[in-house]
Structure formats: C-alpha cells, structure tokens
Amino acid sequence: MTSIWIRPAVPEDAPALAQVHVETWRAAYRGIVDDEFLNSLDVAHREERWRQYLTSGESATFVATTDRGQVVGFVNAGAEREGLKPNMGEVYAIYLLPAYHRQGIGMRLMRRAARWLKSQGMRACLVWVLAENLPARRFYEALGGVLSREQNITIGRQILREVAYVWEAIEDLLAED
C-alpha cells in the first residue's frame, strides 16, 4: 500500500490540482451532470483558477500526495459563504481520485480542513453536496454530518439539487474513531 501524506498546497500544485479536479468531477458526476458539461471541463482553465485560489489567502487547500509526490486528492475550506451563522466554516471542495477511495484518505483530508478551520476561530462546519451523489453523502454521514438544508444549483444547463451537511461542533469532525 502506498503511503499518503497530507500537506498544505502551494502554487506549484496548481497543474496537479487542476488535473485531479477535472478527473474527479468526471468520475463523481457522470450520470448526474450532463456529459456535455463534464466533457467540456478544461484542465488549463481549472489550473488558472487554482493558481488564483492558492495565492488569494481567502481559503486553505490541503493535498493528499503519494510517497512519490503525486497529488491524488485535495480539500479546500474557508469561511462559510452565505453568512448563515457566525464562526461557521465550510468545506468548499473535497475530491479524491477513485483509485484512492475507501482508504481513509478522505477522512484525513476532512479532519485536516476541520483543524485549520478551528485554528481560524470556526466552531462549526458545513459542506454542500449534490443530492444525487450518494457515495459522498454516505461519506459525510459516516463522519457525523447532519443533513441541514437544500437548495437548487445550476451546473451548465441543468438545475440540480444540493444538500448541506453540518457539524454544529467542529470538534465532532475532529474526533477519532
């Protein structure tokens, strides 16, 4: 089994983050999001966006890497974007290449993001997920997330439903099994 390391992302990770982002979107959302939209995802465009995220200082990104340095997943987190509650953090994105699922890496990424959010004064955390993304929903539920709200989201030409999972006490997300 390959050793996996979790570390803060740096701007030089932008190309790998973009590649993982596009690959994982295509894997996770095939059959949910229109193929036309998924096929239009552009790694170069995503790389430029990652460079902006990584230098903005508005959020934190952590990458999961193999012992050879290959980025296989990431988590991006910051302050909750809709102002629902003071001191609420949000996991904006968490993605892991399918070959690395069910090895505890996603849990480690979530906990790393939660530790960072707590260090920024956040006391609670939420994550939005497409309602039809059942594997991700089971993952958040297994980590103790509580279904909290729903809303519509537009992706490409589709209107989809997304749901939020909340950890009212961020410490609950940090608890070891």
Image (cartoon, rainbow, N blue to C red):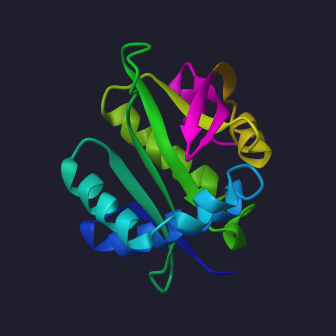
Q: Residue at x 63, y 61 (%)?
A: 36
- In this view, the residue in front, 82 or 152, is 152
- In this view, the residue in front, 114 or 98, is 98
Work out which residue is located at the far top of the displayed protein and give it: 85
Residue range highlighted in magenta? 151-177
- Does residue 164 belong to the magenta stretch? yes
Q: x, y (%) of residue 79?
A: 35, 30
Q: x, y (%) of residue 32?
A: 74, 49
Q: x, y (%) of residue 64?
A: 50, 66
Q: Residue at x 34, y 63 (%)?
A: 9
Quadrant in which the C terminus is drawn: top right
- Does residue 113 belong to the magenta stretch? no
Q: Residue at x 36, y 66 (%)?
A: 45
Corner quadrant of residue 160: top right
Judged left or right of residue 42, residue 58 is: left
Q: Residue at x 33, y 48 (%)?
A: 60
